[in-house]
Image: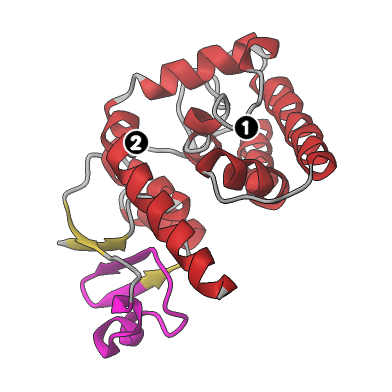
């Protein structure tokens, strides 16, 4: 049995969670709070860097979400989440890396503003939005007219980029300017894996409260 250590609100965890569900794999979910349980000796023995997600399979502990995704594909190749053509593989990897290296730092100020604990000046927010929209245009170019980045087949490109898709509108990114991406996001959100893993309003409110309390404590 696979054991999946994760935090439901973590986007790094969510991409693995979505993949597990899309591949119809049975697993035991070990939900972490990250309020100290990540420093427990048992967890540190799995990941000395004390972060999530971690996947344990028959005594093997796999850390880092991209490594976990690769492991799942190698160990459980059906149904596949990998592109099959050279161009498709290039697209898949580009979308994955652009998401992590370009989208994530761009939207960080926008996310903090959305959650109510950001204090970035307006010009920084405007710059963040411009950088994020460069990524959205790149996504739209790679998607083309297909339903997914891999054409008819959902791939890890959709899993990695798509776990951010539900947040775009809330971040102030005008999805109406990107109709193909808007349709892609709606297509993903209709899938059970996305519906199961999407945080609830209560989850978000609890996270917002924790972050505001932490910032208030740090400011004292």
Image point (47%, 38%), residue name: 163
Which residue does the numbered mark 2 point to in the structure image?
198
| In the image, residue 151 lies in the stretch drawn in magenta | no
Element assignment for label 1: helix
Q: Earlier in the sequence, mark 1 or mark 2?
A: 1
Tell me where residue 9 appears, x and y as whole percent: 38, 50
Along the viewing direction, whichever of 96 and 212 lies nearer the viewer: 212
Element assignment for label 2: loop
Colour treatment of the image = secondary structure
Image point (43%, 85%), residue name: 48
| Crowding at mark 1 (Cα within 10 Å: few <14, some 14-19, many 20+) | some
Task: Looking at this view, name the residue that lies furthest to the front.
Answer: 220
State left or right for residue 44 relative to residue 11.
Answer: left
Where 191 falls versus 7 (above or below)?
above
Tell me where residue 202 appears, x and y as whole percent: 28, 40
User: If the image is split into quadrants, where does the C terminus sit?
Assistant: bottom right
Which residue does the numbered mark 1 point to in the structure image?
88
Q: Is residue 97 visible?
A: no
| Crowding at mark 2 (Cα within 10 Å: few <14, some 14-19, many 20+) | some
Quarter occupied by residue 210: bottom left
User: If the image is split into quadrants, where does the N terminus sit?
Assistant: bottom left
State left or right for residue 137 relative to residue 199.
Answer: right
Q: Nearer the viewer, mark 1 or mark 2?
A: 2
Where 190 falls versus 145 (above or below)?
below
Q: Is residue 175 visible?
A: yes
Where 101 falls versus 95 (above or below)?
below
- Magenta stretch in the rendered image: 36-61
Tell me where residue 150 appears, x and y as whole percent: 55, 26
């Amino acid at each position: 049995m696979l054991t999946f250590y994760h935090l439901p609100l973590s986007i790094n965890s969510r991409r693995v969670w979505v993949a597990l569900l899309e591949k119809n794999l049975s697993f035991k979910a070990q939900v972490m709070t990250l309020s100290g349980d990540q420093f427990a000796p048992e967890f540190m023995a799995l990941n000395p860097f004390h972060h999530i997600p971690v996947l344990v399979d028959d005594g093997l502990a796999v850390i880092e979400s991209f490594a976990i995704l690769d492991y799942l594909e190698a160990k459980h190749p059906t149904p596949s989440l990998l592109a099959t053509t050279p161009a498709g593989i290039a697209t898949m990897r580009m979308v994955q890396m652009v998401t992590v290296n370009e989208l994530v730092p761009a939207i960080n100020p926008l996310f903090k503003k959305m959650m109510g604990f950001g204090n970035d000046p307006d010009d920084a927010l405007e710059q963040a939005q411009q950088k994020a929209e460069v990524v959205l245009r790149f996504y739209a170019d790679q998607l083309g007219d297909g339903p997914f980045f891999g054409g008819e087949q959902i791939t890890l490109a959709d899993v990695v980029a798509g776990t951010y898709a539900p947040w775009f509108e809330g971040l102030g990114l005008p999805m109406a300017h990107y109709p193909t991406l808007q349709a892609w996001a709606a297509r993903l959100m209709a899938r059970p894996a996305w519906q199961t893993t999407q945080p609830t309003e209560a989850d978000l409110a609890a996270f917002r409260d924790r972050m505001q309390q932490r910032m208030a404590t740090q400011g004292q």
